[in-house]
Image (tube, rainbow, N blue to C red):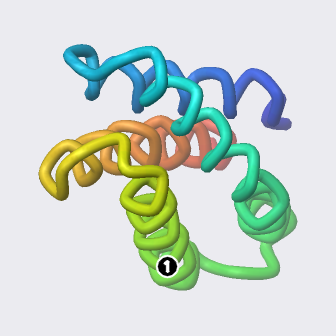
Amino acid sequence: MPIDLDHLFRDMTRAAVGALASESRRARIAIAAVLEDQKAALAAIVAARLAGDIDDAEVKVQLQSERLAFRSGLAVARVAGKSAAQKAANAAFAVLVKALRAAAL
């Protein structure tokens, strides 16, 4: 099943923003910018997995790296504390993993 990447990234942004509901508008803008910066890398991971070029274990490794980059991007933007950045990263990447699992069916 194909994945609509634009829809996926909107959902990831919504999930991350929802995790930081108490943060300001600045946080929402920064989250969207950080995800936009990662869009090509995440799209490549999705494409590689759907093509069968990488397995679930490799997806997990690559997503962990991207999750760390996401948290770092939020920290650089100074939009959230460490715990809040972790929650936002977890929420966004949970959406991505769910979409990959659904597409693999």
Which three-letter amino acid code belongs to the residue tagged 1?
Answer: Ser
Where is 16 relative to 79, above or below? above
Q: Residue furthest left?
A: 83
* Residue 71, x across and y down, in percent: 39, 61
**Quarter of the view holding residue 38:** bottom right
Disc 1 residue crowd, few under 14, some 14–19, many 20+, Cα 10 Å: few
Quadrant for the N terminus in the image: top right
Viewer-proximal residue among 100 and 90: 90
Q: Quadrant of residue 24?
A: top left
Residue depicted at x 51% and y 60%: 73
Query: Image point 26% across, 15% down: which residue?
Result: 21
Q: Position of residue 51 (x, y in %)?
A: 86, 66
What residue does disc 1 label?
Answer: 65
Q: In this rendering, would 45 be left or right of 82? A: right
Query: Which of the two residues, 4 or 52, is positioned nearer the viewer here?
Result: 4
Q: Is residue 49 left or right of residue 44?
A: left
| SS category of the residue bearing label 1 | helix
Question: Residue 31, percent across and down?
Answer: 52, 37
The quadrant the C terminus occupies is top right
Count of numbered badges drawn on the protein: 1
User: Which residue is at a point 45% across and 15% down the rendered structure image?
Assistant: 25
| Image vertical order of residue 21 relative to residue 82, above or below | above
Look at the picture and state if 48 lies above or below 90.
Answer: below
- Left or right position of 70 against 49: left
